[in-house]
Amino acid sequence: MTESGYLHPTPIQEAAIPIVLMGRDVLGCAQTGTGKTASFTLPMLDILAGSRAKARMPRSLILEPTRELALQVAENFVKYGKHLNLTHALLIGGESMNEQRDVLDKGVDVLIATPGRLLDLFDRGRILLADCKVLVIDEADRMLDMGFIPDVERIVSLLPRMRQTLFFSATMAPEIRRLADAFLQNPKEITVSAPATVATTITTGLVWVRDMDKREALRRLLRREAVQNALIFCNRKIDVDILYKSLKRHGFSVGALHGDLDQSTRFATLNKFKANELQLLVCSDVAARGLDIGGLSHVFNFDVPFHAEDYVHRIGRTGRAGREGHAYSLAAPEDARSVAAIEKLTGKPIPRMEIDGLDPVSAEEIAEGAKAKRGRGGRPAPGGRDGGRGGRDGGRDRGRDRGGREGGRDRGGRDHDRGRRPPVETIETAADDVPLREARPPRGPRRDEAHRDEAPRDRAPREGRRDDRGPRRDGRPGRDLPPREEMQSYAARREEFRRERREDREAGPSPRGFGDAVPAFMLLPLPRPKRDSAPETDPGPDAEAA
């Protein structure tokens, strides 16, 4: 462990490692950056060192919510088990399934996987979990956020009941507690810090800025601070791409990382950032959990996170292992409620900062943003403050979704920089006072009322019927109906037909036969019988007697 840089165990490692070596289930809760990965990896190596794995039957299983986390755990396993003859397999999406099956056929001691790819290979019959003795569920709260809990429950049902389960999470929500009670048997609960707390080695700050000035504020912060390397978090993948192009255009060494990129691009970008080939990495929350980037100096929240817990995980990428770190957030007036939720969760206010050269945001604007009714995306709902359709992604300002423009209007004419609709006259008229409706291509001639009067439709009334039976109750003219005598005649014929049918039923069933029609086969001529061609002779008296 000295080669890996470990001199003294962290609190979570000191408390968890002896319990794991005893074979008991563990429920560990510790803030991010405290060394939870080593707290279960190191004792697992000691437990697995005495025996050998069978083909397609791993001896232990580590579940991770993201590919990056799974890759990082695999790297730590290789580093910690350098002098041990133990094998491992990494099952993640975006990689060749054939290569993963070949590794499983040889037998592995530690299987590190994401839930989706593991179940895919199990359904194909390429892996068996009957010999798994140790299960590790890492970042359980992230599993819950990403919707992996049903998959995790199915995987647990496939494992043997006699096993050791290690359950680690950065927060302990009621849902996490319920899952722990279902998966663990008489666990030892280890909590080394209060849930959702910020490490004391992180210097935090909050800048109130208008939404249209966010990029300029971020560039000034990057130039003002002594940034060695930094993660810049956005709430949406499309904002990641837009901010990446903006920073690259202004001469920054920057990369982009989010879930829509293919796996090879994600790994290559992350490796370049870890090797200090890139100074900045614009990313989504895919990089907010568990990633250990040595010496990360800064974290910037370009967008205030939707969930207050994500703030703790984001800024926890810096200030790790006792190092100092800096975490700064940019908040628009519309984010006032999210900021209040973060401060309530962490139990202390975020220190305010100001940036020279930008117009300060007044307290009235912040108070107005706190009172504004929001959609599900955390932004003011479309169409002003009265609500409307939102969403995790849909509530954001769509002016920046098209070509990277910070302003602009969408199809409804909404002013994205201010979150309200422009006056009606700007919608109804063009710049040269020509109505927009007149600029549309003609749809063809329309028949107005005068034209109908000039060319009335030629309708000849039917003979023996009235043209109009008088107006209806609503004032419209009535339909053409047959005269009363014809209606009475029709009713009489219908009654006569019903009477004849009734008499036929009372008379009983009629004899079945051909009726008046003669079938065609009865009209065919019958063939004459064939006679013997021998000459006729007189039979004589003897024949007559016989």
Image (spheres, grey):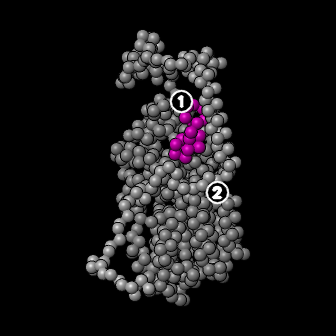
Q: Residues within 10 Å of mark 2 (few under 14, many from 20)?
A: many
| Dominant SS type (magenta) | loop
State the residue in front, 288 or 220: 288
Residue visible at 60% across and 35% down in the picture: 387
Q: Seen in the image, is 341 located left or right of residue 419?
A: right
From the viewer's side, name the closer residue of 480 and 161. 480
The residue singled out by tag 2 in the image is 196
Q: From what the image shows, is residue 481 above or below residue 367? A: above
The earlier-in-sequence mark between 1 and 2 is: 2
Mark 1 or 2, closer to the camera? 1
Residue at x 43% of width, y 59% of height: 522
Q: Secondary structure at mark 2?
A: loop
Front-lying residue, 246 or 275: 246
Kindly give the residue lying farthest to the front in the view shown.
541
Is residue 539 magenta-colored?
no
Q: Which residues are magenta?
A: 375-395
| Residue in the image at 51% along x and 82% along y | 57
Q: Residue 269's image quarter?
A: bottom left
Query: Which amino acid type is marked by label 1?
Result: Arg
Disc 1 and disc 2 in contact, CB within 8 angstroms = no
Residue 26: % across, % down = 66, 73
- Quadrant in the rendering for residue 376: top right
Please give the label number shown on residue 253: none
Which of the two residues, 449 or 477, is positioned nearer the viewer here? 477
Q: Which residue is mark 1?
A: 420
Residue at (67% x, 39% y) in the render: 499
Near mark 1 (Cα within 10 A), the count class, few <14, some 14-19 or many ≥20, is some
User: Does residue 276 show up?
Assistant: no
Image location of residue 529, percent across then percent down: 35, 71
Residue kind at label 2, given as amino acid type: Ala
